[in-house]
Amino acid sequence: MNPEEFQQALKLKGINVNEQQMKQFNDYFEMLIDYNQKVNLTTITDKKEVYLKHFYDSITPLFYVDKLKESVSLVDVGAGAGFPSLPMKIIFPQLKITIVDSLNKRIKFLDELINKLGLTEVQLVHARAEEFGGKKSKYREKFDFATARAVARMSVLAELCLPLVKVGGQFIALKAAKAQSELENSNVAIKTLGGEVVDDFSFDLNNGEESRHIITVNKIKKTPVKYPRKAGTPNKEPIGNQGDR
């Protein structure tokens, strides 16, 4: 997917990308590739692949969740090189973004990137997600939306993201081919953390070659104060496994 195909594909979805935004995506690509020589941000470096598998893929939640097009708050957990939140921010500048990542080198890249792109209302936080959403955190249950892409399996993501979402808000997971089995194995975790699965939107990213899922989880009640557990525990002992009985 070259930049022109990217622009046209979004137009077919009812999203018009202007020339300034196209320049922002080009600057994003160039800075990503340049910085990637110093810090490992991505294994995908071909321009067409970046536009498809990073930029376009990151924007796909906008096809299914209309409220993301409003002036809402969104926390992106483990965003790495800014995916999925920053491509969405370029498309809809009114989004209020907070990015939390545990690696300071990535935060440094993101800081330089948002300055280069002229993005406002983007907050960067260097922290482990478990600490960021802890019971004493000012960020706990403060966001309209939480997103995560390629961070961990669904049962783990639920514990990292749902504590950050306010009651009435939504957690959006961007998943690939194993989404259905992950979802089945995360039912106990999602319910325990105050969530309820609403939809699993499935589609092919590249003419049937790559399966994608947008899973939406409503926050219907407060997350118990014991969650999230200390750093590393959600991954070692996902809720619903023997370790958390």
Image: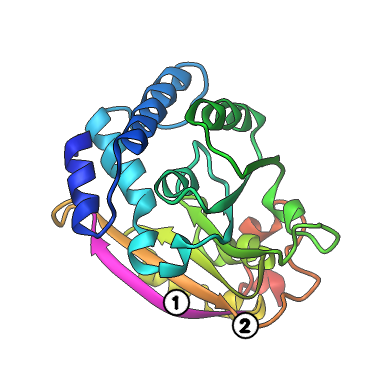
Q: Which mark is residue 106?
A: none
Front-most of 97 and 179? 97
**Considering only vertical position in the picture, is 76 above or below 190?**
above
Q: Residue sitting at 39 percent across and 71 percent down? A: 181
Residue 101 visible in the current orientation: no
User: Magenta stretch mostly in which secondary structure?
Assistant: strand
Residue type highlighted by circle 2: Ile
Give coordinates of residue 231: x percent, y percent: 73, 52
Q: Residue sitting at 43 percent across and 50 percent down? A: 88
Front-most of 105 and 86? 86
Which residues are drawn in magenta?
A: 195-205
The quarter in which the C terminus is drawn is bottom right
Q: CA distance from mark 1 to mark 2?
A: 19 Å
Q: Residue sitting at 41 percent across and 68 percent down? A: 65
Q: Residue sitting at 39 percent across and 48 percent down? A: 91
Front-most of 91 and 46? 91
How packed mark 2 is, by other alpha carbons closer than 10 Å (few <14, some 14-19, many 20 or more), is some
Instruction: Say which quarter of the image contains residue 242.
Output: bottom right
Q: How many marks?
A: 2
Give coordinates of residue 35: x percent, y percent: 48, 20
Residue type highlighted by circle 1: Glu
Q: Which mark is residue 184?
A: 1
Residue assigned mark 2: 220
**Considering only vertical position in the picture, is 181 above or below 68?**
below
